[in-house]
Image (tube, rainbow, N blue to C red):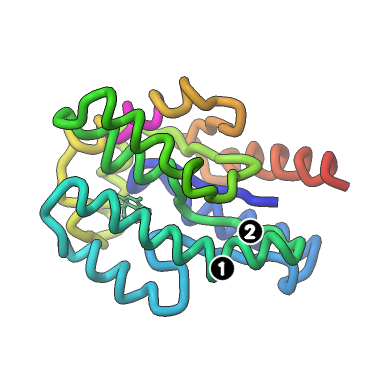
């Protein structure tokens, strides 16, 4: 079973992934649950994460392929072996992040290029998540959360307009490949947000048994 968490920066996905991880570990044991993230969720990936989040690249397609490269390593070393061993994988971000942040947020990318980029994950044969939780929050509320946390990277500094385009990008991706997506209103109390996630995860795990 492969769970993915998506959303704009400040949407609360890491907190929710922590909670789901706790729930699944309690139910299935820590040996059967693999919690990971992108970018950098593989051995040696911390340097890749630091490089890209410190603003190490300036070309649009360079950034796109860097995140894809990071994902290929992540899949090969972490995700695929865990899924093959029958484990539950929870990833904080996956392919939709690259499509939303690098492709659909960018007015300079035309429809053909966006279509090409969207198909690449299938062409490469990346594993398909069983469910993608999209933590839906408006860009203004997300920025306030980030500001109160005080952590920033070069992506956080891209401004309100950028995050609005990323959110619109997610909406486009969901509209064209909606069946795996579960959209959750993330502006609510984290307990309520987790209630929805836990219900959906339990439903899917029961179907699997
Ligand atoms: P995080 O704060 O959720 O850990 O993600 C780090 C940043 O990396 C976040 O601003 C989103 C960005 N990112 C992309 O732009 N494209 C991607 O493919 C991924 C995985 C992350």
State the residue at coordinates (79%, 46%): 205
Q: Eyeballing the image, is 28 above or below 120?
A: below
Q: Eyeballing the image, is 113 above or below 125?
A: above
- What residue is disc 1 on? 78
The residue stretch that appears in magenta: 166-171
Give the SS element for disc 1: helix
> Label 2: how many residues lie within 10 Å, few (<14), some (14-19) or many (20+)?
many
Q: Is residue 5 left or right of residue 167?
A: right
Q: Position of residue 4 (x, y in %)?
A: 55, 48
Please indicate, yes or no, whether residue 120 appears anywhere in the rendered image.
Answer: yes
| Gap in angstroms between the C-alphas marked 2 and 1 | 9 Å
Q: Could you say which is closer to the camera, residue 12 or residue 130?
A: 130
Q: Is residue 188 left or right of residue 57?
A: right
- First in sequence: mark 2 vs mark 1: 1
Q: Eyeballing the image, is 140 above or below 205?
A: above
Q: Is residue 208 left or right of residue 146?
A: right
Q: Position of residue 18 (x, y in %)?
A: 56, 60
Q: Eyeballing the image, is 47 above or below 144?
A: below
Q: Could you say which is closer to the camera, residue 168 or residue 136?
A: 168
User: Residue 156 got which mark?
Assistant: none
- What residue is disc 2 on? 89
- Front: mark 2 or 1: 1
């Amino acid at each position: 079973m492969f769970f993915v968490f998506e959303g704009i920066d400040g949407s609360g996905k890491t907190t929710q992934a922590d909670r789901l991880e706790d729930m699944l570990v309690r139910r299935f044991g820590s040996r059967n649950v693999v919690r990971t993230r992108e970018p950098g969720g593989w051995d040696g990936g911390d340097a890749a994460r630091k490089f890209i989040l410190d603003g190490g690249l300036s070309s649009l397609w360079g950034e796109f392929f860097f995140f894809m490269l990071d994902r290929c390593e992540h899949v090969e070393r972490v995700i695929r072996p865990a899924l093959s061993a029958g484990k539950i994988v929870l990833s904080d971000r996956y392919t939709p992040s690259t499509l939303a942040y690098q492709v659909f947020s960018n007015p300079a990318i035309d429809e053909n290029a966006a279509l090409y980029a969207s198909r690449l994950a299938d062409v490469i044969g990346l594993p398909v998540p069983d469910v993608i939780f999209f933590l839906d929050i408006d860009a203004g509320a997300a920025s306030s959360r980030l500001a109160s946390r005080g952590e920033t990277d070069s992506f956080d500094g891209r401004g309100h307009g950028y995050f609005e385009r990323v959110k619109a990008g997610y909406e486009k991706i969901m509209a064209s490949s909606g069946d795996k997506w579960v959209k959750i209103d993330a502006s609510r109390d984290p307990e309520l947000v987790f209630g929805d996630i836990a219900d959906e995860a339990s439903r899917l795990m029961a179907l699997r048994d």
